[in-house]
Amino acid sequence: MGAMPFSELFKGRKPAGVTADALNIEVDQSDKLAIVADLEASGVSWFWATDPKGRITYLSPSVAAALQTDISTLLGQSMQTVFVPAAGETEGRSLGLKLGSRKSFAGLTVRASKPGTDLVLKLSGRPVHSSSAEFQGYRGSAIDVTEEFRAEEEAARLAQFDSLTGLANRHRMENRIDSTLAAFRQSERSCAVMMMDLDRFKQVNDTLGHAAGDQLLQQVAERLRTVLASRGEIGRLGGDEFQVLIPDMDDRGELGEFAKKIITMVSQPYSVDEGRCTIGCSVGVAIAPYDGVDREELTRSADLALYAAKNGGRGQFRFYAADLEHDANLRKRMEVDLADAIENGSFVLRYQPVVATDGNQVVALDAQYFWTDEERGIVEPEIFLPVAEGSRLIVPIGEWGVRKACQDAAAWPSALRVSIRITAVQFGADGFVNTVEQALKDAGLDPSRLDLLLCESILQGDPTAIDKTVSALFKLGVRLTLDQFGSGFSSLSYIRRTPFAALKIGANFFEPTTRDPHGDMEMVQAIVSLASAMGMETFAAGVHAKDLLSRLTDQGVHYIQGFVFSDAIDAERVGDELGRGEWTLAPTDTGAQRASRRTVLRRIGLIHEDYYYDVTLRNLSRSGAMIQGLEAVPAGTQCVLDFGGGQLAVATVRRTMDDTQGVEFEQELVDDGAGGLCTRHRVSPYDLAAAGVPLQALPAGKYSAATLQFDQKPSIPQFSLSTNAPEQTGREAA
């Protein structure tokens, strides 16, 4: 198709309402064409025309040049193929609609469709008709608004995105969460919000400078993009606080794996201009509609979970639970009471024997903190030490502990070591090495008899500071053991560089798996082989049973610690045992050494058909549980365990003895981030709403009848209550 002659394009166009005769001016057509050509060349205005089918019949040469295309290839192409609506154009396929309407239009913003071409035009056009009113196409003008459009686009981007990392900013994340929740309520879909906070980021800013901190944040953003891929949106809310929105996900198993992957990726070392650095990450997770149905409620739930993760020792994740706010208040009160306990000297050390697998001889004693409180009684270390670490009260408590352990050990035989755990907060405190040195000197203890158990999170700090402290301790002559190896994110390069005498394998490796009821023995074997290759000894902590002890001994583990030999005992009893001569312990599966496991007992619900019973949970694993409280429950009985908070687990009774049953779950439980287990899914608030309950975050109480279908409706409970559990009641499921 040939181009419309330039003279024809403007033939007959006169100022509206004014004629040449009225002005008594003779219009020179060549002057008109020259003026138009000058306009096109200057870029002030360009021109275009189409035939009745919307195909280009004329286009200013300057437009073709901007499109980096020969004009001959553009002629005959559809106008709406060459140009498409610009981003933000509210009418969608507006160019095609405009050309199809055969009406005049103005101010329509379009961009070039050719990839890599940066051209934005504002089009105006009017339909052209013949003398017989036949539609002949469009003629119009175009103004180049590329620079203005890009400036507005950049301003809009800056209003929604973080200028440093390119991630969404707080304003955009709030809008995205609001719109997602509003849309998902209508379609009964779920979404998760993760709140993340970087651990030890302030240390990077303080030691390496703010420029290094900015580079670090940019690298963190890239790692988060890598982990999340296209699953959701990531935002930086300010400082070192990040947020993630993940649509259509409520599986806490998947979310837990996501959180672990984020923590692992963020915790790997970074290279910045000023050197290398390592940080950590804590994550809080909340899921809509379970933990909130609007943005304020959901983000508050995620914040509470993040707070719990940070106070639990950092480098961890937590799911929101309804009791977290209550726990936060209890934690604040405990911090105050711990500060008073330091002044009052309310702490004691108890010692758990560490036994050699070759001969069952006690070779060391592991010091464990206990707090004697008037209201709480004897408080175990796993309850108050995370609070002490989060508030930095662990520093004075730890100083007292090292001094006390050295004093007690000085009275023991010279072949017996004492070990004590050192947290990352203690390790990084000013004067830590001096504290250890002074404690040894005051007690007159040989430094080689003091074994400092360093947690893996210590290795995630500033490498220079770590190397300096480790070197000073090594020169001091104390023994160093990497505690709970495999439960964190330690680097093999650090293990190779740091003079550890031993690796202590954490009890998490001994949780039953689908392949082995004794835990991950293949990984244990790998750790033993690694330690052997590096000239280190191996410890196993938290060993409770003789059959597990036998497996670990077969794997080549050197030393065992756990209830299979003894619980922690006080210093006076240690003295009594040592006074009898050589101290050996025989392993056992029964007796007083298992008494402390009673702390795992708690009340849960059991639903059978349409009746609800209160029972006692005795122990729990991923695949099953031991419950107590009902009699005459035959093997093969199907039931549902209610762990609270909407957590229902379908289970089958596999074995029964008197009032105690062993049950197997239909679906395995998953990590809850706090060292415990939880169900993958919970009762859906959408199901509750369908049953007449207002749509809200999961309320307290029991919801089973609204969501479970029963095949029959017995008039009386089928099981009788145990006479050993008089407080239990059987009642119809709520």
Image (cartoon, rainbow, N blue to C red):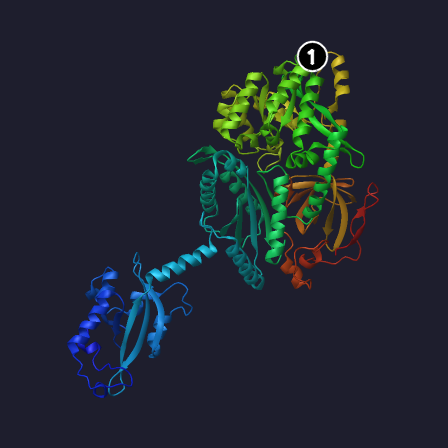
Residue 603 figure quarter? top right
User: Which residue is label 1 attached to?
Assistant: 413
In the image, residue 554 above or below residue 445: below
Query: Which of 335/365 is in front?
Result: 335
Q: Is residue 402 visible?
A: yes
In the displayed structure image, the side of residue 315 where residue 410 appears, left or right: right
Q: Is residue 563 visible?
A: no
Q: Amino acid at mark 1?
A: Pro
Query: Which of 34/215 is in front?
Result: 34
Give the total of numbered labels: 1
Task: Give x and y (percent) for residue 713.
Answer: 74, 58
Residue for point 22% across, 78% down: 10
Residue 311 figure quarter? top right
In the image, residue 501 above or below residue 286: above
Task: Give x and y (percent) for residue 199.
Answer: 55, 38
In the image, residue 108 above or below residue 529: below
Quadrant housing the N terminus: bottom left
In the displayed structure image, the side of residue 127 where residue 733 appears, left or right: right
Q: Residues within 10 Å of mark 1 (few under 14, many from 20)?
A: few
Task: Give x and y (percent) for residue 629.
Answer: 78, 43
Query: Which of 266/250 is in front?
Result: 266
In the displayed structure image, the side of residue 17 where residue 181 appears, left or right: right
Element type where label 1 sits in the image: loop
Task: Give x and y (percent) for residue 398.
Answer: 66, 27
Residue for point 23% across, 68% down: 40
Query: Which of 438/493 is in front?
Result: 438
Residue 724 figure quarter? top right
Quadrant housing the C terminus: bottom right
